[in-house]
Amino acid sequence: MSQKPSPIGVALLLPDTILQSRYRIVRHLGRGGMGAVYEAIDLRLGHRVAVKQALTCDERLWRQFEQEARMMAVLNHPVLPRVSDYFTEDNRAFFVMQYVEGSDLSDIIAQQPGPLPRNAVVAWADQLLDALVYLHSHDRQIVHRDIKPHNLRVTDGGRIVLLDFGLAKSKGANHEDKDSDRSVFGYSPRYAPLEQIQDLGTTPQSDIYALGATLYHLLTGVKPPDALTRATAFITSKPNPLKPAHEINPAVGEELSEILSRAMQQNPNARYASAKEFREALRRVGRVRESNPELDAAYNAFRSSLELDDEMTLLATPPRRAGSRLGMHAIAAIFVILLAGFAVFCRYYPWKLPPATEQTGNTKIAATITAQVSSGAKKSGQPGVKLSSTSELAASQRK
């Protein structure tokens, strides 16, 4: 039976503290609104885990903490960490989850100010949207409600992981389970939609806004203005403080910029109807229009370094110009094959020598053919060279 919280025991744990005679605290990793996270060793199984501690004396928040543990325990997705244990000890509540090695995107942004590589950001977005499709279509629909760089971790293999379900809410498929629909009011101003800031209720479209705002930050290197500031500017007829992403970073491109703008619409109904629709829009922008061996090699090296899924999005390659090196090589190869075929034909065909006059004419015809072939080779950038038949050229010589 769960203990009730008390003002006792909300201080941070010290290294080497042992919980449940099983988990030895190694170091403090960070803290959020109502919890602290530690790296720990599972003494029974001998591997690293993450232990989250509730830093609250509020009984309602402690129930929310327990709900977070139960919610995450049933999830099974590569972008989401798994919870393996929940317990209370000395008027303190804890849960144990998968330890994710890597760096938070907020730390990466602090160390490397400015836009992050577009290919990497779009690939992360594809993985995150796959996780949101999973959460939003789960038996008990889950809305994360706190997607932001601080809650996204990039593993050493290059994958993205969505952390901290402290503000998440879930409800049954029939939406009639009021007890499971409980959630804590809270938001991160730069990334939360207006309906969440005003506590008007959140839906999957709220996660779509938060992810759009997060991608905007990663692609431009600039934090998006909060939704309340944008609403105030609209009401007071001031310029929109949210500049299109491609105007800040031209490498984003207009198509991707428009996708972000739609995801960040103030009206939830104007955003993408689902995470799946959002993901498909990004994939259309990232579809490869032509095969390019150099870009294919770069893509394979990039995917190998990040260990991404086969569904990773690759940005479109620019159209290849006519007369490129590949086209010239192809035309040269065709010409060599035709020339070799003609040589074989000449070797085995039973030639009959014509009269001297005709032979002279044929000599001129052969010269004409050679001149035309030579002329065609010089114009290898053209689709092909049309050669006149021998009979046609002979007729022209007679004339």
Image: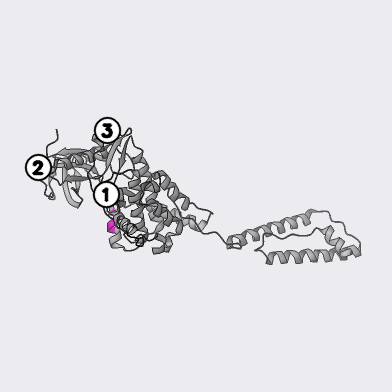
Characterize the local packing of mark 2: few (<14), some (14-19) or many (20 or more) Cα atoms within 10 angstroms. some
Query: Mark 1 is on which residue type?
Result: Gln
Q: Which residue is mark 2?
A: 6
Outermost front residue: 236
Report the residue at 77% width, 54% height from top. 345
Give the residue number, with chain letter if any, for mark 1: 198
Numbered tag placed on residue 332 in the rendering: none
Mark 3 or mark 2, earlier in chain: 2
Task: Give the amino acid type for the residue marked by disc 3 in the picture.
Answer: Asp
| Residue 353 lies in quadrant | bottom right
Residue 318 rendering spot, x and y as whole percentages: 51, 59
At label 1, counting other C-alpha atoms closer than 10 Å, the crowd grade (few under 14, some 14-19, many 20 or more) is few
Task: Tell me the SS state at disc 3.
Answer: loop
Residue 63 falls left or right of residue 130: left
- Name which residue type carries label 2: Ser
Q: Which residues are magenta?
A: 103-107
Q: CA distance from mark 3 to mark 1?
A: 23 Å
Dominant secondary-structure state across the stretch colored magenta: helix
Q: Which mark is on residue 177?
A: 3
Q: Position of residue 213 (x, y in %)?
A: 34, 54
Query: Which of 393/149 is in front?
Result: 149
Mark 3 or 1, nearer chain start: 3
Q: Is residue 368 left or right of residue 31?
A: right
Residue 58 drawn above or below residue 231: above
Residue sitting nearer the eye, 18 or 3: 3
How far apart marks 1 and 2 lie (CA) works out to 30 Å
Q: Quadrant of residue 226?
A: bottom left
